[in-house]
Image (cartoon, rainbow, N blue to C red):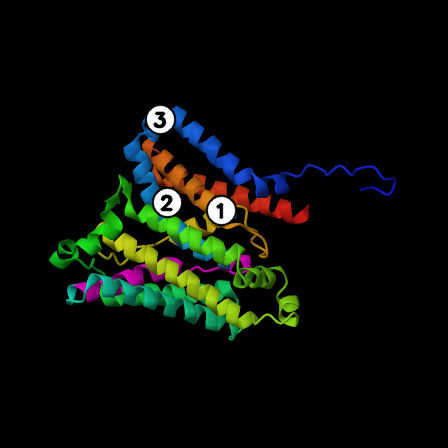
Amino acid sequence: MNNDGTVKKEKFSIGKFYSKLGPLVALLVLVIIVSILNTSFLTVSNIMNLLQQVSINALIAFGMQFVIMTGGIDLSVGAILALSGAIAAKLILGGMSPVLAFLVGILCGAVFGAVNGLLIAYGKAAPFIVTLATMSIFRGMTYVLTNGNPITGPKMNDSFSFQFLGQGYLFGVPFQVYLMIFAYIIFYVLLHKTSFGRKTIAVGGNEKAAYVAGVKVNKILVWIYVIAGILSAVAGMVLTSQLASAQPDAGTGYEMDAIAAVVLGGTSLAGGTGKMSGTLVGALIIGVLNNGMNLLGISSFYQQIVKGIVILIAVLLDRKQAND
């Protein structure tokens, strides 16, 4: 409302528009373009394949959402995925129940995430530097554990529970898609409907103000990186099951896809703002982009260039939004 009593017209902003509807519009436009260029895109088999690919990135991105909303970053998620999967595979081949081995793998992911959180929260080290270092450490541990070779064997294929996680179907839909949806609901509620979520947003908006208001900032930060570690480990279990083996280089580059999904979904890299629904849409955008370029026979070298450009555009829109 203006001083003269007239209604103040809100100025149109590309940044604000993108944060509200941009990700969904971008996804719809991308689907239409790919569908026109390749009619096999909308076949049931391809859609199921697409959702399988998206589910792993989405699981990691849900954890990355919390991290980025605090103004942080986690470059170690791909390495945590690989190491957790390798540990679970080793335990299965050693005779442990696949269900118990998966739980141990997820627990390991939580511990790895806690290491990141403790170093960042109490060591007061920059998230980029800490997770860059732990990425190297966890990846090195994976190579030591696997001796640089895939972990596989008859027991990896004999267990129904192991196979079903990454290869099973329920009512014609891959089981891992249900897992993605379940994780989305849980972490949507955690971020948007609980005090923990409100504290996460407060820490990202202004860490000092959150501390003055009584928020236990260090505790929140540690738990956020634990969440990122757990979800990366879950993604590692799914990928290990899907491949029926633990690959030493599994998850390489996955951190970039997860960050891209969060940023494309409208979450600010400065922290404090973002929606879980946007991250899910962002993961779908990355998935459609990858799937579409594969169907069109575009070289993987050019795919990296295209994805980089898309991420750069999203970052520029993020800065535009911050300046509006």
For the residues bearing labels 2 and 3, Cβ distance under 8 angstroms? no
Q: Quadrant of the N terminus?
A: top right
Q: What label does residue 277 carry, if any?
A: 1
Spatial CA span between label 2 and label 3 = 19 Å
Quarter of the rendering containing residue 101:
bottom left
Give the residue displayed 29% in from the left and 47% down from the top: 175
Compared to residue 60, the image places residue 221 above or below, namely below
- Whether residue 57 is visible here, answered yes or no, is no
**Residue at the far right in the pictured view:** 4
For this view, does 28 lie left or right of residue 104?
right
Mark 2 or mark 3, whichever is nearer to me? 2
Give the residue displayed 31% in from the left and 48% down from the top: 176
* Secondary structure mostly seen in the magenta stretch: helix
For this view, does 320 lie left or right of residue 114?
right
Residue 257 percent location from the top left of the image: 42, 49
Q: Nearer the viewer, residue 131 or 241?
A: 241
Q: Is residue 76 magenta?
A: yes
Compared to residue 283, the image places residue 96 above or below, namely below
**Residue at which label 3 appears:** 38
**Residue at which label 2 appears:** 54
Residue 316 percent location from the top left of the image: 58, 44
Identity, as a three-letter code, of the amino acid under mark 1: Ser
Identity, as a three-letter code, of the amino acid under mark 3: Asn
